[in-house]
Amino acid sequence: MIKDMNKKPTVFVGVSGGVDSSVAAFLLQHEGYNVVGAFIKTWQPDFIECTWREERRDAMRVCAHLGIPFITIDAEKEYKEKVGEYMIEEYRKGRTPNPDVMCNKEVKFGIFLTKAKELGADFVATGHYARRVETNGKIQLLQGLDQKKDQSYFLWTLSQDQLKHILFPIGHLPKDEVRKIAEKNGLFTAVKKDSQGVCFLGEIDMKDFLQHYIPKQEGKVLDTDNNEIGVHDGALFFTFGERHGFTITKKGTSDKALYVVDKNLEANTITVSPEVSDRKKFTNPKEIRIAHTVWNHLIEFGKKYSASIRYNQIPVHCTIVRGKDNQAMVIFEQEQDTFSPGQSIVVYDGEQCLGGGIIV
């Protein structure tokens, strides 16, 4: 690719056909970068209605409106093998995966970053609500200023080497301002609804999806006294804190919602309770071990940090004890009720995302 030497570096923007990536591309173009729009083709199983062609058309329209080149990067193989199959296998093991984290790691900042650099890009950019600040050659990954939209939780796997080549053009903006910029500059995506659901599947029922790969197996629903009170289609399909998907056949005197607080894969049972805090009867709710850790900044022993176990959770005060083989122990000040093996714990120092790991 021939670069325009009169412009700033070349940036490949991952354009999805949505408003966030559209405005990201516009802002970079406005700042003088040499911008290329890149649509990342995803994997969708045959039994799900195909949407990528429509999304690609919208991405092409955005790039045509901005007058920037448009390319398609085929990441179907990587999505299928490293995101889709990972997610299915994690459920088979009774764990709770986070496919959006894996999508960012393996696809958006994996294969996309690799191919973009091969094609001459200096940076890639996305419409994530996160911020990147460079100081003395080190990159800080910060939360998006719009706390309701902050997506730093999904970006904890990014290393310094990756962050050096990544831009987040809209992380300093609230969502309503992003839509105003799109409307003011004639982008049709200004009124387009936000995408929902899993990154590559869209809005689907997760249990319906998994049942194409994991057979149903009826099991018992138990209360915390080990009494049988209902039935379910398979303990593998449930995560801790979930309150849907099982049938209660023995009604009590209370109509309170029931939460999954334990499960036994060997016996194919789940245990439910009206108090999600009953999770602590089955595990230590303050000390949680994580593996596959990635730290983009040094973690100090004994220093007080904060951490989130799920997206949009307000970070809870904790300390970190680093272990061997990319493991660590997260010691929370408050009991955590709904954590599950397979989930990500993301660690913060104020608004700076330091990295994290996967609960074991």
Image: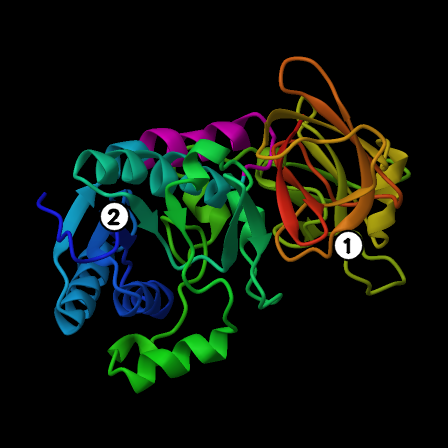
Q: Nearer the viewer, residue 83 or 171?
A: 171
Residue 70 lies left or right of residue 39; in this view the side is left
Q: Which residues are magenta?
A: 79-97
Q: Nearer the viewer, residue 122 or 358?
A: 122
Residue to which mark 1 is pinned: 258
Of the numbered discs in the image, which one, if any, rests on residue 286?
none
Q: Which amino acid lies under the numbered mark 1 shown in the image of this protein?
A: Leu
- Give how far across and how far down residue 245 sits, in percent: 61, 51
Q: CA distance from mark 2 to mark 1?
A: 40 Å
- Give how far across and how far down residue 152 sits, in percent: 56, 51
Q: Is residue 299 above or below residue 239?
A: above
- Give how far across and how far down residue 317 sits, in percent: 82, 46
What kind of element bears circle 1?
A: loop
Q: Nearer the viewer, residue 108 or 228?
A: 108
Q: Nearer the viewer, residue 151 or 246?
A: 151
> Does residue 299 appear anywhere in the picture?
yes
Judge the density around disc 1: few (<14), some (14-19), many (≥20) Cα neighbours within 10 Å. some
Residue to which mark 2 is pinned: 40
Q: Main secondary structure of the magenta part?
A: helix
